[in-house]
Image (tube, helix red, strand yellow):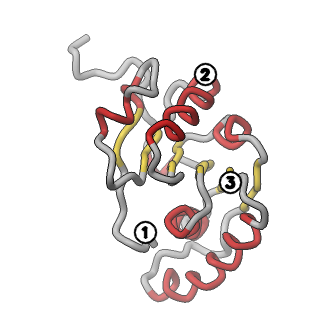
Amino acid sequence: MSHFEATNPTPDPESVSRVATLGGGVIGQSWAALFLAAGKTVTLFDPAPGAQARVRQSVDAAWPTLTALGLTEGPPGELILCRDAREAVEGAQFIQESIPEQLALKNELYSLIEPVLDPAAVVASSASGLTLSEMQSGWAKPSRFILGHPFNPPH
């Protein structure tokens, strides 16, 4: 096997059915709307009170734009609020992390979720002020971790 071949190949994006969003702020809300528009089940972790209601409102507000852009594939996927980040990522094939840009906070989250990730899952960070190498320091095996910074808003 060449050094470019993955030992745990990532899933075909079309086959991804469950996505986790970590962080329900403005960027996380918009990512959730985009994933829900694609019919994905979205598990959301955000410890802030009222996060699920804010995300649902944001999805409702974004839906007309998503529809006008041709990005909706029918009714939205299911949104599930998780009280624990490990619960949110368990079984997810793609994880979009959009928590505050504090390296210690991100590294704490990565250390928490890494042991329960699906072997083929990809984790993307929406970070804009931290480098990939800085954030990779929070991983035992950073090969599944990428920078997935969006336009604003992602949807």
Q: Earlier in the sequence, mark 1 or mark 3?
A: 3
In the picture, which quadrant includes the C terminus?
Answer: bottom left
Q: Position of residue 76 (x, y in %)?
A: 66, 71
Horizontal and vertical percent for residue 45?
68, 50
Q: Residues within 10 Å of mark 1 (few under 14, many from 20)?
A: some
Q: Residue at coordinates 45% horizontally, 81% vertically from top-left?
A: 70
Amino acid type at image mark 1: Pro
Q: CA distance from mark 1 to mark 2?
A: 28 Å
Q: Amino acid at mark 3?
A: Asp
Q: Position of residue 127 (x, y in %)?
A: 39, 52
Badge 1 vs badge 2, beta-carbon distance below 8 Å:
no
- Compared to residue 100, the image places residue 50 above or below, namely below
Left or right relative to 85: residue 131 = left
Q: Position of residue 138 (x, y in %)?
A: 45, 27
Q: Is residue 65 above or below residue 19?
A: below
Q: In terms of image quadrants, where is residue 41?
A: bottom right
State left or right for residue 135 relative to residue 33.
left
Residue at left offset 61%, top offset 85%: 61
The tag on residue 141 is: none
- The residue singled out by tag 1 in the image is 154
Of 93 and 108, the residue lying toward us: 108
Q: Which mark is residue 46?
A: 3
Q: Secondary structure at mark 3?
A: loop
Which image quarter holds the N terminus? top left
User: How many marks are shown on the rendered structure?
Assistant: 3
**Type of amino acid at the residue the image marks with label 2:** Pro
| Inter-mark Cα distance, 1 to 3 | 18 Å
Residue farthest along the top direction in this orientation:
1
Choose the circle earlier in sequence order: 3 or 2.
3
